[in-house]
Every structure is written in C-alpha cells, then in structure tokens.
Amino acid sequence: MQLDDADRALLALLRDNARLPASDLARHLGLARSTVQARLARLEEAGVIAGYTLRPGPGLRPPLRATALVSIEPRAGPAVLDRLRALPTVERVHTTSGRFDLLVQLAAQTTEELDDTLDRIGEARGVKGSESLIHLSTKIDRGG
C-alpha cells in the first residue's frame, strides 16, 4: 500500500495520541471528517494500523528499563527464546545483525529484579555472552 503525505501525517498524529477524535484529526490535517474516517478504515484494512493501544504513562511503567545485548551459539535460538519468554521482566526481543544476536528489552520494579533477570539470561543454555545497558532517561519516544 502506498502512503501519501496525508496518511503519514495522520499516522504521526495517532502516534502522539491514538484517542484523538476523527473531527480533531480532520481539523489538524485540514481534511473533512469523513475523509479522515475513510483513510483510517483503509489503513486498518491494509494492516498499516493494527490496533489502538494503551501507552502506559510514568505511573504505570516499571521504574527501571534496560537493554540486554545477547550473543548465542548457533542453533540455540529456539531454546534461548523459550527461556526469555519465561522471564516476566522481558518485554521484547529483537534479532539483530552484528556482534550480538538478540536485543532484549527489559522492565523491572527493582534493581534486584533486574539483576536477577540479567543473571538468568547469562546462565541460559546457549547464551555465549551478554552486555547490559541501563536506560537513564528518555529523550525521544515515538511509541514504537
């Protein structure tokens, strides 16, 4: 599906606040409300918009966030992913290219919980090594 400038602007507005009414979106974009509704329906049908979701504010988010960069042994991916799925502090896992095989996003309530999770990742069968990065502050967040 080809996105035009109006589609991209609409998606940017929704990224900032997915609860904006169609009339507010239309006013921001300089379009008719019915045009915005038709665009939303088209973007939903094409799978560009997969859903509207809650983006937790600071009061709901765990206070500690971190990224673990993990290198694994060949063919150990499924076992390592099973281990990561079992850890409640693991939010997302991405495969990567380069020195590390996985990028693991973590969220924890305490430093002890984060430390325990990092230990469990490091001792998982098939993990060759890891490096952790504690998130200090967020400078840009586009909700993705």
Image (cartoon, grey):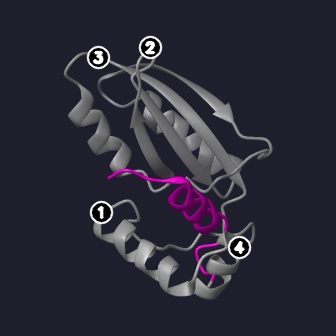
Q: Which disc, if any, is residue 98?
A: 2
2 vs 4, front mark: 4
Q: Which disc, if any, is residue 46?
A: 1
Residue 108 coordinates in the image, percent (x, y) = 62, 54
Q: Which residue is drawn at 51% across and 77% down?
A: 36
Q: Earlier in the sequence, mark 3 or mark 1?
A: 1
**Which residue corresponds to mark 3?**
73
3 vs 2, front mark: 2
Q: Earlier in the sequence, mark 4 or mark 1?
A: 4
- Which picture quadrant has residue 66? top right
**Which residue corresponds to mark 4?**
28
| Mark 3 burial class by Cα count in 10 Å: few <14, some 14-19, many 20+ | few
Q: Element under label 4? A: helix
Q: Residue at x 23, y 25 (%)?
A: 76
Residue 38 coordinates in the image, percent (x, y) = 41, 78
Q: Is the magenta region chiefly helix, strand or loop?
A: helix
